[in-house]
Image (cartoon, helix red, strand yellow):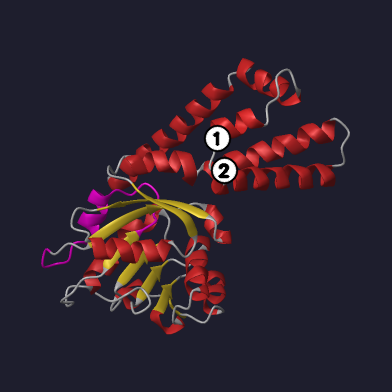
């Protein structure tokens, strides 16, 4: 089995997430000639081409001889893309490993759509990344079909490791929906929190530019303490909360207004929506 550096990679779709992964790979010394990207939109394709990798408008051409195929398209078009790819693989002796970042599309659906005309199935890994991958600070949840080997998992780890600081394999596919509700959608929760912090401070008289700088750095600093420190979130919260102090007053207000229930129900809502989308799109 080739190493990641030796592998030929095909990205089906050249949007932001594909661009982020490609950028991460190139920063780690990946050979540009080993990467081909299929992208129908001129703007995206030209942006990708500026990185020095090969581009095409043909999914079949991109995936024809690839060792790893990364499906990075919208869920609504995944079926057609998969069927186009499988049709081009019938003459191949060895099938590629497929990595799908198409949200909600299940392994069962992917396996059916990617089956070759002679009945062979590819090995598939589903990935739920998140947008901080764009700044090489991503968090990704992964789930593999039973036939994926340890060596193939290592290849995928290396692939995602170019943009993700946390790559977590789950042992049940439905847990990817939980990952979606947690880290997939999670950046938006933090963005919303900072947005409201800025609005509150501005309403109390602080200039918006100052409020924005203070709130965003607070978010970054708190995150760094979580990642680099040894204390869990609960202990970190206690460390900054003096009895009857300012933080205590704010946290009491959070609690009185049902903060825990709001977070819990919101993550559940995102998780349920991910499962619903997978079920609906898989039937198309």
Q: Does the magenta stretch include residue 18?
A: no
Pointer 2 local density, CA inside 10 Å: few below 14, some 14–19, many at least 20: some
Pointer 1 local density, CA inside 10 Å: few below 14, some 14–19, many at least 20: some
Answer left or right for 182 relative to 194: left
The secondary element bearing badge 1 is classed as helix
Picture quarter containing residue 258? top right
Residue 168 seen in this snapshot: yes
Q: Mark 1 sits on what residue?
A: 233
Q: Position of residue 35 (x, y in %)?
A: 41, 77
Q: Where is residue 96 in the image (x, y as percent from the top left)?
A: 25, 70
Q: Residue 226 carries which label?
A: 2
Range covered by the magenta-colored residues? 100-119
Q: Are marks 2 and 1 in contact (CB under 8 Å)?
A: yes
Q: Does the magenta stretch include residue 108?
A: yes
Picture quarter containing residue 74? bottom left
Seen at 37% across and 61% down, the residue is 157
């Amino acid at each position: 089995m080739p190493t990641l550096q030796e592998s030929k990679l095909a990205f089906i779709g050249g949007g932001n997430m594909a661009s982020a992964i490609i950028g991460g790979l190139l920063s780690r010394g990946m050979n540009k000639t080993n990467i081909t990207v299929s992208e129908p939109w001129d703007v995206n394709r030209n942006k990708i081409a500026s990185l020095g990798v090969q581009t095409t408008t043909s999914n079949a051409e991109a995936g024809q001889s690839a060792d790893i195929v990364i499906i990075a398209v919208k869920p609504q078009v995944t079926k057609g893309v998969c069927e186009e790819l499988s049709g081009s693989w019938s003459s191949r002796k060895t099938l590629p490993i497929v990595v799908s970042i198409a949200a909600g599309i299940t392994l069962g659906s992917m396996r059916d759509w990617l089956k070759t005309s002679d009945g062979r199935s590819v090995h598939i890994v589903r990935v739920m990344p998140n947008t901080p991958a764009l700044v090489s600070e991503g968090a990704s949840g992964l789930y593999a079909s039973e036939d994926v080997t340890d060596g193939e998992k290592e290849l995928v780890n290396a692939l995602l490791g170019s943009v993700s600081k946390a790559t977590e394999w789950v042992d049940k596919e439905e847990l990817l929906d939980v990952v979606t509700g947690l880290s997939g959608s999670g950046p938006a929760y933090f963005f919303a929190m900072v947005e409201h912090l800025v609005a509150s401070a501005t309403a109390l008289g602080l200039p918006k530019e100052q409020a924005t700088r203070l709130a965003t750095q607070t978010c970054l600093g708190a995150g760094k303490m979580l990642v680099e420190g040894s204390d869990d979130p609960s202990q970190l919260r206690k460390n900054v909360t003096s009895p009857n102090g300012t933080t205590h007053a704010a946290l009491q207000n959070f609690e009185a207004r049902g903060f825990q229930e709001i977070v819990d129900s919101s993550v559940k809502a995102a998780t349920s929506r991910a499962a619903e989308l997978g079920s609906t799109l898989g039937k198309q």
